[in-house]
Structures are given as C-alpha cells and as structure tokens.
Amino acid sequence: MNKIMPEVSAWYQDLVSGSLFEVVAYEEETGTVEYQLVDGEVGEYDRSTWKQLTLINAEAPEDWRGPFELNDGDQVYNDETIVPENWSGVLSDLEPDSFDSGDDFQIV
C-alpha cells in the first residue's frame, strides 16, 4: 500500500508499469489526483487507486517538455508587456470616418 501523498508539480514513477508522471492537480475533498505522463497523456486516479500504486518520488526527466514543444525560454507566467518599436503604420493613418463599417455598426 502506497503512503505517498500526492503533491502538485511533483514527479512519481510507478514501479509496476514503469510509467513516469507529474501530478498536475489534487482535489483533497474528493481524493482525485490528476496526472500527466511524459508523452503528454493525461489521466486521473481516485483515492483508492492512488493508494494501491507502487510509487517512488522521481526527478523530472530532461526531455519532459518535448511533447509540448517548450524550451528553456518559455515561462509559465510572462508579465512582460510587448511594446512595438514603431507605432507608425498603415492602420495609424486610418480615420474612423474613412472606412465603411456596414449598416449594422455606427460610430457615434
């Protein structure tokens, strides 16, 4: 019987099947563990199935981002604002009255 508690973002290896996976979500109230395999496949374990697994803690594989086409430059959260270097262009020359927006739309 497995006594490891699931932890989000932690990697585990199932010793019986050999599968390596990351826990991506854990719902304590329902005991649901959502996981993602190295190849990108996602799945879910209920509390009783999780406890029956023969697991060990594992390190994230070096190529785990391969199925997602991510690289080291990709970030989960990117707060950088993208500002164009040149604000001039064809669209900046348009005036609101100079284009036909059709009968369904009026500029007031």
Image: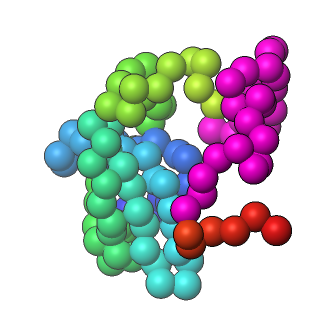
Above or below residue 93? Residue 23 is: below
Q: In which image quadrant can residue 66 be found?
A: top left
Above or below residue 28? Residue 2 is: above
Farthest bottom residue in view: 29
- Magenta: main secondary structure equals loop
Task: Please give left or right for residue 73 compared with residue 98 in the image.
Answer: left
| Residue 65 point in image, percent of width and height | 42, 28
Farthest top residue in view: 85
| Magenta stretch holds residue 13 | no
Residue beneath the point at 31% across and 54% down: 42
What segment carries the magenta color? Answer: 76-102
Task: Please give left or right for residue 75 compared with residue 52 in the image.
Answer: right
Identify the image's colour scheme: rainbow, by chain, secondary structure or one colour: rainbow
| Residue 63 point in image, percent of width and height | 38, 21
Residue beneath the point at 74% across and 36% down: 94
Above or below residue 22? Residue 86 is: above
6 or 66, which lies in front? 66
- Residue 64 visible from this viewpoint: no
| Residue 26 point in image, percent of width and height | 52, 67
Residue beneath the point at 59% across and 26% down: 74
- Residue 74 visible from this viewpoint: yes
Which quarter of the rendered picture does the N terminus lie within?
bottom left
23 or 107, which lies in front? 107
38 or 55, which lies in front? 38
| Residue 97 point in image, percent of width and height | 75, 50
Count of residue discs: 0
Above or below residue 32? Residue 16 is: above
2 or 98, which lies in front? 98
Q: In which image quadrant can residue 21 be found?
A: top left
Task: Please give left or right for residue 77 compared with residue 25 in the image.
Answer: right
